[in-house]
Image: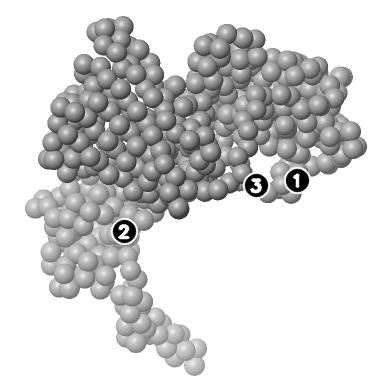
């Protein structure tokens, strides 16, 4: 009985129905699988291989390099010699221009009873989606790093400008410094757009602005153009802003500032012998019309018809041909319209129509610090430029402040002389801001920890608190933002706030 049972058991291993079942399993795998001999000839293939590489015709009898790579001889990077010689699995990533796809290939050696390997299984898998996700992650990481570095630099620049503004009384110098500050904040927005583009997110916010003040700001950012023309060639270009003071519009300031700036630059370049750029506006029932009128050389109908086309330029090597294309795109994003009227030799009028809002106008005030009681603050940042700027701003606001570029030294100092508020950067070489927060809270839970960073932190308040962080401040920040967060931190401290992390 035993011998019969053993015979039956042995026979079952080669049961035709089971072999057929295994074949069905392999044929339903989406990876393409082939069995090859040591001469690269395909002995067997599954359905996916026949469909993907053979167009529905069996690959048996052909060579793997023909079907996998479209070659007439073995591949230069062939895995077979290494697989057969070392009897281990070898993998390789390839790009196939025939399909415009990335594939991963794996070669599996098949051992004979004598211990030799003379056949191998070749498995191919489309990894294009995985590859794209990996490339996207790398792009996001690179862009985030760039954003972080730029935000660090901009934090120092904006802070220094604000300190200078508080020390200077000359109107011309104050105007120039405020223009620098505005440009730096716009630069921060541009950097954020890079990050948004690579991550596929967007955080563009509309703001209600006074049109007269907004256009005046744009003019002040670009008046160096005609001042340079005046000093270089002796020509005179003047700007006139004739806009009612009571018109408010909802816009994305950074975007529309770029659009208006492009129009102004084009107008200045068109007035080669000098002239006047006049910006007017009228408020209609549900829209605001803004006219940019120059007395330049004008444009032909052909130029007007093509002016919004990408890469179209009349400036030769001076222009990219993207300025007016960008203007058109920004106006459309604002649900507006743009039109051009021009006469050769007389000038051009660009008319932009935007939706009008009737928001309550808020008078713009110069920065005045909040009535915060003096606080004892420690700042930790490995960037010396940022550290010096932040500590000077806090000292200027009347606080007792100390700064450390070393997180380890800061923690040691804190254990002997606790501070009420800790401002710490997130990305530092010795330890991260998260680690700093945890150590601070372990020593003194009452101390308020403010984490600031050029990275975007997408965490809820509860999640921040769980990590020992009470408040978060995004770089780059203005002195007003710094003052506000310290005001909040001091209030938390005085209430006896305890965050155990």
Disc 2 versus disc 1: distance between alpha carbons? 42 Å
Foreground disc of the pair 2, 1 = 1
Disc 2 versus disc 3: distance between alpha carbons? 35 Å
The residue singled out by tag 2 in the image is 126
Q: Residues within 10 Å of mark 2 (few under 14, many from 20)?
A: some
The residue singled out by tag 1 in the image is 466
Nearest the viewer among 410 and 367 is 367
User: Which residue sits at x=20%, y=36%?
Assistant: 342
- Residue 262 drawn at (x, y percent): 33, 31
- Residue 216 drawn at (x, y percent): 46, 27
Q: Which mark is residue 459?
A: 3
Dot 2 or dot 3: first in sequence order is: 2
- Residue 31 drawn at (x, y percent): 32, 65
Which quadrant, please, contains the C terminus? Answer: top right
User: Which residue sits at x=62%, y=30%?
Assistant: 364
For residue 187, say whether it is visible. no
Quarter residue 193 falls in = top left
Dot 3 or dot 1: first in sequence order is: 3
Q: How many marks?
A: 3
Foreground disc of the pair 2, 3 = 3
């Amino acid at each position: 009985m035993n011998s019969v049972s053993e015979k039956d058991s042995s026979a079952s291993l080669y049961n035709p129905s089971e072999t057929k079942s295994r074949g069905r399993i392999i044929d339903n795998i989406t990876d393409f699988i082939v069995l090859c001999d040591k001469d690269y000839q395909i002995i067997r293939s599954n359905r996916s291989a026949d469909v993907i590489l053979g167009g529905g015709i069996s690959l048996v009898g052909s060579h793997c390099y023909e079907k996998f790579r479209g070659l007439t001889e073995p591949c230069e990077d062939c895995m077979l010699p290494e697989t057969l010689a070392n009897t281990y699995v070898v993998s390789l990533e390839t790009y196939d221009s025939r399909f415009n796809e990335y594939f991963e290939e794996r070669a599996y050696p098949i051992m004979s009873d004598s211990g030799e390997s003379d056949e191998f299984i070749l498995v191919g898998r489309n990894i294009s989606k995985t590859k794209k996700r990996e490339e996207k992650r790398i792009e996001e990481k690179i862009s985030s790093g760039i954003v972080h570095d730029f935000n660090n630099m901009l934090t120092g620049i904006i802070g220094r400008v604000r300190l200078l503004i508080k020390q200077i009384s000359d109107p011309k110098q104050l105007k120039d410094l405020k223009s620098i500050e505005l440009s730096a904040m716009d630069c921060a927005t541009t950097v954020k757009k890079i990050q948004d583009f690579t991550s596929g997110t967007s955080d563009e916010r509309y703001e209600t602005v006074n049109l007269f003040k907004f256009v005046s700001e744009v003019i002040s950012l670009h008046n160096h153009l005609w001042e340079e023309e005046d000093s270089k060639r002796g020509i005179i270009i003047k700007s006139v802003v004739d806009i009612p003071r009571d018109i408010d519009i909802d816009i994305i300031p950074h975007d529309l500032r770029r659009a208006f700036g492009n129009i102004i630059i084009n107008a200045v370049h068109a007035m080669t012998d000098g002239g006047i750029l006049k910006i007017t506006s009228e408020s209609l029932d549900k829209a605001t019309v803004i006219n940019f009128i120059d007395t330049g050389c004008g444009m032909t109908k052909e130029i007007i018809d093509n002016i919004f086309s990408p890469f179209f330029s009349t400036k030769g090597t001076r222009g990219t041909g993207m300025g007016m294309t960008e203007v058109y795109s920004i106006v459309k994003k604002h649900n507006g319209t743009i039109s051009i009227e021009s006469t050769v030799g007389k000038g051009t009028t660009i008319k932009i129509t935007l939706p009008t809002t009737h928001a309550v106008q808020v008078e713009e005030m110069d920065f005045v610090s909040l009535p915060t009681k003096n606080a004892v603050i420690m700042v930790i940042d490995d960037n010396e430029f940022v550290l010096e700027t932040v500590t000077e701003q806090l000292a200027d606001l009347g606080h007792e402040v100390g700064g450390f570029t070393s997180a380890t030294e800061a923690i040691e100092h804190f254990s002997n002389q606790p501070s009420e508020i800790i401002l710490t950067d997130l990305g530092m070489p010795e330890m991260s801001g998260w680690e700093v927060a945890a150590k601070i809270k372990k020593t003194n839970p009452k101390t308020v920890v403010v984490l600031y960073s050029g990275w975007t932190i997408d965490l809820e308040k509860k999640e921040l608190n769980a990590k020992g962080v009470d408040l978060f401040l995004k770089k780059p920040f203005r002195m007003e933002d710094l003052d506000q967060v310290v005001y909040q931190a001091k209030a938390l401290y005085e209430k006896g706030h305890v965050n155990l992390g």
